Image: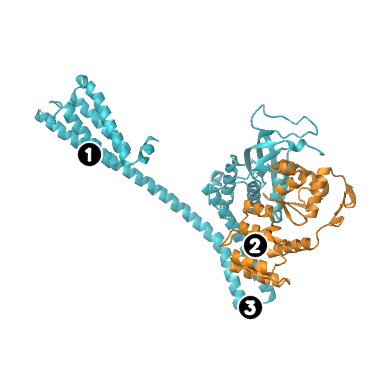
Chain colours: A cyan, B orange
Amino acid sequence: MKRTLYRKGGKLKQFLVSIILVCSVSAICYFLSAYIGYRVVAYILLVTVSLIAMIFDILPVLFAALLSALIWNYFFIPPKFTFTIGSTEDALMFMMYFVIAMVNGVLTYKIRQIEKQALQKEEKENAIKLYSTLFNSLSHELQTPIATIIGATDTLKESENKLSDTNKEALVNEISIASLRLNEQVGNLLNMSRVESGYLKLKRDWCDVNELIYSSLSKIKDKAGEHTIQVSVVENIPLFSLDFGIMEQVLYNLVKNAIQYAEKNSVISINAKYTTLVAGHFDQPTLQGKAYSDKISHKLILTISDTGKGFPGNEIDKVFDKFYRLQNSKTGGTGLGLSIVKGFVEAHHGNIKLRNIPGSGAEFTIEIPAQTSYINALKNE
Amino acid sequence: MIDDEQQIRKLLEITLQSNDYRFIEAENAKQGLAIAANHPPDLILLDIGLPDENGHSVLSKLKEWYNNPIIILSVQSREEDIVKALDNGATDYLVKPFRTGELLARIRSAIKKNSSPKNESLSEFSNLSIDFANRVVKKNNDIVKLTATEYSLLSIFAKNEGKVLTHHYLLKEVWGPGYMQQSQYLRVFIAQLRKKIEADPNFPIHIITESGVGYRFN
């Protein structure tokens, strides 16, 4: 921490701090020199310069080395208060001190430079790795539909007379499917960049959890195919203060994921319940027919499970990583869906966990702390 | 149509002309406002992202004198943009990319509503009928008992068939201007109303949720 703090300060600050450090250490040594002898002072000053070298840039370090050498000479080497050095031994000591302080400073600085380079190299390698996965999945997921659109329109334009009506219709249909797929992937990328950029601002409003779940299901139920989707919401669940659109996307992505990866005829279950976040704040509405809207903090717990094969145990921790695709994954996808889910849930200060249910499929559990409103008790106004 | 994207204009020109609409296009706000003033159309399609002027300000200028429907076209679902436009008097909105079938339906609905303002005393919506004179609502010919608030919510919906009504608008109209932030009332009453008038309240066909924006009644 200290290191970055000083690094951020300008060069001038580094020089100042070096001077202050060397002078203060010298001052302390000056009072102690009667007990420890002036040669030990040289070691203490060397340590000081080494410490400075661990933190500061090369120039302030060399300056500290020079300054400490001069101070040692002037204040400590007899005769004191002159730059004259009395004995040959001391003159030699002084030169040695000077060289050691300089070499020490330069070496420490070099080691730090190498460390820095190694770190940068590692970061760069990670970035390259991320980009290559990105390119692989994006080139597939974006370019396949684009290729379809370009190919199909070319055929339609150039071989119009040779095509039967059925074939024309088939080509137009392919274009339509490809554009929808492209649209979904672009939507994913935009959502991912909203999460990444930190631009994502929640528009919290009171949400009816039932409405939230069914609204997202209404957008995906045509794709459910041979799967069965079950919903169970605990009775009298309060309204939660959430971003409706964002949470709808979370549920959509999770259900879509289950539909894509679970085997045919799986049962996909969505469960919603809640717990009280702070004990003692929980007040059930008791006044029948009266408005009751005290805002209480609760935790909303959503689970989305399926009866598929579950996730391979060694990959379970990675599924929320950006662009991560399961090995042996056959279906298309950019590997963004679940990382968007995680980002959106975390934007709500919530968390998401994945586990395999023994003997059954996978289960995602989302927990989101949020304000609630118990106005549900209000009836027949 | 006021939109700077030439491809979208071309697409809509073909689509609308083949559905017997006359199509006039403008590529920026200045041109659009001038054409609208000289030949007031039956309906305006307005893009929010125009090169020379913000679509919201074009909407305000149009609303000063133009009373026919204005449908907003907006790229990506920027909820704030949509809500702002609807609260400023836009009739409806569509998020780009949209399906042309959806656009045609919205245009039909907007024009129909505009030509025949709902003042008949009886309205029918598939299995649902509302008799405004006698304040009677029937589902499959059975009378539905509604509370006063539920009825006033339903009648506002029925008078704005096909139109997206924002949360703020509904709260203001049903509960009053002081309740515009009290969306919890709306959530509860929508749920109650759906239970009474929808065949399946979980997958409603009358009161449709427009995520983050409001509700649309069909």
Helix, strand or loop status at disc 2: strand
Relative depth, front residue between A272 and A290: A290
Q: Nearer the viewer, mark 3 or mark 1?
A: 1
* Residue A15 coordinates in the image, percent (x, y): 29, 37
Q: Inspect the image, locate mark 1, and give the three-letter code of the amino acid beneath it.
A: Val
Residue A160: which numbered mark, if any?
Answer: 3
Above or below, B8 relative to A286 = below
Mark 2 and 3 residues: CB-CB less than 8 Å, in contact? no
Residue matched to label 1: A103
- Quarter occupied by residue A63: top left
Q: Are marks 1 and 2 on the same chain?
A: no
Relative depth, front residue between B144 and A342: B144
Q: Is residue B100 visible?
A: yes
Question: Horizontally, is B6 left or right of A26 in the view?
Answer: right
* Residue B63 coordinates in the image, percent (x, y): 68, 59
Relative depth, front residue between B172 and A203: B172
Residue matched to label 2: B46
Q: Inspect the image, locate mark 2, and give the three-letter code of the amino acid beneath it.
A: Leu
Residue B79: which numbered mark, if any?
Answer: none
- Quarter occupied by residue A142: bottom right
Question: Horizontally, is B41 left or right of A341 in the view?
Answer: right
Q: Nearer the viewer, mark 1 or mark 2?
A: 2
Disc 3 crowd, CA 10 A, few/some/many (<14, 14-19, 20+): few
> Furthest-bottom residue in view?
A161
* Residue A93 coordinates in the image, percent (x, y): 15, 31
- Quarter occupied by residue B92: bottom right
Question: Horizontally, is A271 left or right of A288 in the view?
Answer: left
